[in-house]
Amino acid sequence: MPGLCPGVGRLVEPDRGAAALADGVLEQPRGLLGLAVREVPGPPAVPLGDLVGGAVRDELPLVQPDGAGVLGGVLTGNRSGFVSNASPTTVTDTIIRGSQGHIDYCVFEENAIGLVVAENSRVDTVGDDFRRNTRAIRTRTGGFFGEGGAKNIYNAGTANANRMADVEAYAGSGDSTELGRAQQYVRVAYDRVARPLTGTTAPTTLCAPYTIPARRLFGVGKQLRVHALGVFTATTAGSVLTVSFGGMEVNFTVPAAERDAPFELDVTLLEVSGGYRAIGRLGQGHAGTRHATASRGFNVNEAQPITLSAKPNSRTDALTVYRTDIYLMG
């Protein structure tokens, strides 16, 4: 089955025939597409096309000619990608899907995108040379790449520099080293029921959408965020909104009297050196913003309910909280 890997003035073919591919088991790994390859005489070959592979058995070493090239295609479900022990191997327009393995010591030259790592693939790129691509590497939909050995060459500041980006990562994908340390907010609870309050000056709990489990925020760098949106139908200066994290209360005094004023309340509880601190802000209509903080009363060793409450300054005050969201990081 010649023609998988186009050489420069020569043809490269796999040592095993079509049966290995048909069975979905690539038995000659560590070469191009996990196949050991050998040089044979002949003209340059056709593009790679789409290959779907199963398990790859690391049994034989790579035998690859100098100057081989791969015209690219789609690799799906393979354990070894392109591995070149002889240089240069030129690779173009390659998409990796559902695979893991290496692409080592290859040249990606004059591509719209040199390498796309997608659909839950992990690719270790070692010593690859990216020349004059519009974008060198793009990751998407759970694709990860790393540089586990010799660093890649992106040719910055030279005539071979890539035109728009060396690395372009979409959400949920990217550099495995960066993502190995990354954290993100996850919304763990919300309250979408309208919570009106009027006719009282007593402190009143509007909602309690979440309880922080005991020791859930134990550890370095963890934090929890409360975000609420509502409208003051009528309010007077001196009314108070409070976010409580168990025994820790963060109080926000309404900046000024106002009618039909939307408001936004945003408070974050942070693990800091020496304990925990909450910092937040209340923004109200045209009347401005108030900031507040608290550092006492939160007990990480016990379950702590999160509540949003209000204490109107007048019985004629009226407000409605329309949405409260709770986000957790770490």
Image (cartoon, rainbow, N blue to C red):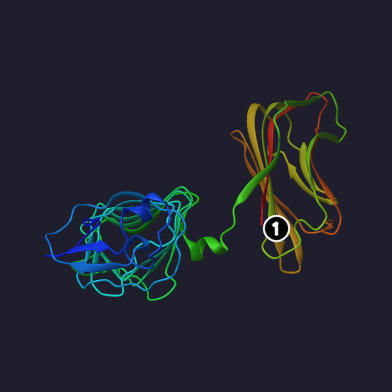
* Residue drawn at point x = 50 percent, y = 66 percent: 177
Task: Report the side of 33 relative to 197 (left or right).
Answer: left
Q: Residue at x 20, y 58 (%)?
A: 110
Q: What is the x, y in percent for residue 325? A: 68, 39
Is the residue 61 above or below the residue 115 in the image? below
Asked whether residue 51 is in view, the answer is yes
Does residue 88 appear to the left or right of 197 in the view shown?
left
Location of residue 329 with respect to 58 vertically, above or below: above
Mark 1 neighbour density, 10 Å: few (under 14) some (14–19) many (20 or more)? many
Q: In terms of secondary structure, where does tag 1 sit?
A: strand
Q: Residue at x 44, y 52 (%)?
A: 77
Q: Position of residue 111 (x, y in %)?
A: 23, 55
Image location (x, y in percent) of residue 245: 80, 49
Q: Left or right: where does residue 162 sit relative to residue 226?
A: left
Whether residue 131 can be seen here: no
Taking depth in this image into account, of 170 and 243 the one nearest to the observer is 170
In front here: 264 or 62?
62
Quadrant of res 287: top right
Q: How many marks can you see?
A: 1
**Residue closest to the eye, 325 or 219:** 219
At horizontal 42% and vertical 52% (from top left) the residue drawn is 24
Q: Could you say where residue 22 lies in the image, as x and y percent from the top left?
A: 37, 49
Residue marked by disc 1: 270
Say which quadrant the N terminus sits in.
bottom left
Q: The C terminus lies in which quarter of the figure?
A: bottom right
Q: Quadrant of residue 314?
A: top right
Inspect the image, locate mark 1, and give the three-letter code of the amino acid beneath it: Leu
Foreground of the two, 14 or 239: 14
